[in-house]
Image (cartoon, rainbow, N blue to C red):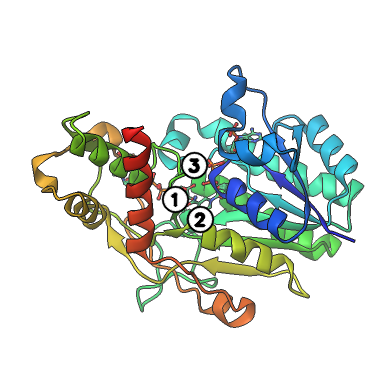
Amino acid sequence: MSKNALIVGANGQDASYLAEFLLEKGYKVHGTIRRNSVPESQTTRIEGIRESGLIDLHYMDLTDTISVDSVVKETQADEIYHLAAQSHVQVSFELPKYTLDVNSGGTLAILEAVRRFSPHSKVYHAATSEMFGNSCDADGFQRETTPLIPVSPYGCSKLYAHSLCHNYRNAYKMFICSGILFNHESPRRGINFVTNKTVLEAVKIKLGMSKKLVLGNLYSKRDWGHAKDYVEAMWLMLQQDKPNDFVIATGETRSVKEMVKYVFSKLGMNWEDHVQTDKKFERPEELDYLRGDPTKAKQLLSWKPKYTFESMMDEMIEYWLKELKK
Ligand code: NAP
Ligand code: F7E
C-alpha cells in the first residue's frame, strides 16, 4: 500500500518541490494552506499538482491549535513534513512575537497533536543554520555539534522548536528528525530573499525594465544549495531506522557580493554600475558567516547534492529571463 504524507505549509518553496518528489515516489500527499484574502496566491507554487487533483489540501494555521489537531487526526499520515514558518530573518526583527508564536508555538502544536492523535507518524522538523548565529568550529565549519547561539528572533524561535523536538523524541519515544538546513534557493524562492531578489532585478536591468538593485550587507557569507536537493535529504531522514539530526549544506561559502558579481557577469554586466546599498536592508544583528559540514548526512543518508552554486544560479537566471520576456 502506498504511504501517506502530510506537508505542513504546502505552498512554500521547499514544500512545492517535496510534494512533487513524494508524488513521484507514489505517496498519497496531503498539504496544508492558510486562509488568504487573495485565494490565487495560496497555491501559486503548487498550481500544477493542485489542478490535477494530486494533492489533498486542508486549511490549517499554526496559530490555531484546533486546526492543527483536526488535520493531524484526520490524515493519520505515515510521514509529516513540518515546513511551515515565518521564514524571513529580517522580518522576524519586526514581527518577533508572531515569529515566535508560529515557529515555536506552531511546532509545539504539531508535536502535541502527533503525540495525542497520530503517534505512529514520523515527523520532519525544518530547523536551520540560523540557529548557529555567529558560532563556528575552529576549522571554519558548522556541524551538528557546534554550539547554537542564534542572533535573530527567527533563529531563537527555531532553536526553541528544535529543542522541543529533542524533548518529545526522548520523553515520548517519538520519531522526530530535525534537519539543520543551510540556505537553499531556487526559481521558486521568495523574491525578498537575497538570491532571487538579485537575479530578478539583474534580469530586469538587463532587459531595460529597471536601473538599479538596492541591497543591504554585501559582506555576509552564506552556504547556498538548491531546494530540490535539500528536500530529498528531508525524505531520506525519515527513511532511517532511528530519528536523528542532520546538517544539510554544500560545504562551500560565498559572500553576498560574490553572488551578486556572478549574476551580473553571467548577464554580461558590471555589478558596480548597478548596485547600491541602503541600511534599511541591514539587520539589527547580522549572522556573518555560514559554512556547513554535511559529512554526517553523506555518510548515514548517502545524500549528495546534484546542483552546484553555478548551475543553481544559472537556472534562476534562465527562469527570470524566460518569465520577463513573456
Ligand atoms: P517559505 O517559502 O517561506 O514557506 C513557508 C510556508 O509556511 C508557506 O507555505 C507559508 O504559507 C507557511 N506558513 C507561514 N506561516 C504559517 C502559519 N501561521 N500557519 C500555517 N502555515 C504558515 O519557506 P521555505 O524556504 O520553503 O522553507 C521551509 C521551511 O524550512 C521553513 O520552516 C523555513 O523556516 C525552513 N528553512 C528554510 C531554509 C531556506 O534556506 N529556504 C533554510 C533552513 C530552514 P503562505 O504560502 O500562505 O505564506
Ligand atoms: O539573506 C544579506 C542578509 O534573507 C542572506 C532563510 O531561508 O536562510 C535564509 O535566511 C544574506 C543576509 O537569507 C539583502 O543580510 C543583503 O546576510 O536571503 P536572506 P537568510 O537571512 O540567510 C536561513 C538558513 C533560513 O533558515 C531562513 O529561513 O543576505 N542581504 N542585502 C540581504 N538579504 C535580503 N533578504 N535582502 C537584501 O536586500
As drawn, is 267 to the left or to the right of 300?
left
Mark 3 vs mark 2, CA separation in Å: 23 Å
155 relative to 240, above or below: above
Q: Residue at x 90, y 61 (%)?
A: 1
Q: Is residue 9 visible?
A: no
Q: Which is more N-terminal, label 2 or label 3?
A: 3
Q: Is residue 122 visible?
A: yes
Location of mark 1 (residue): 186
What type is the residue that disc 3 sits on? Pro
Mark 1 vs mark 2, CA separation in Å: 6 Å
Residue at mark 1: C-beta within 8 A of ligand 1: no
Residue at mark 2: C-beta within 8 A of ligand 1: yes
312 relative to 92, above or below: below
Residue 130 on image: x %, y %: 47, 54
Q: Which of the 4 quarters of the picture holds residue 123?
A: bottom right
Location of mark 3 (residue): 153
Name the quarter where the C terminus is drawn.
top left
> Do callouts 1 and 2 mark residues in contact (Cβ within 8 Å)?
yes
Q: Which of the 4 quarters of the picture holds residue 41?
A: top right
Q: Residue at x 60, y 63 (%)?
A: 232
Along the line of sight, the residue nearer the viewer: 45 or 244: 45
Direction front: furthest residue: 326
What type is the residue that disc 2 sits on? Ala
Secondary structure of the residue carrying numbered label 3: helix
As drawn, is 247 to the left or to the right of 122?
left
Location of mark 2 (residue): 227
Secondary structure of the residue carrying numbered label 1: loop
Q: Which is more N-terminal, label 1 or label 3?
A: 3
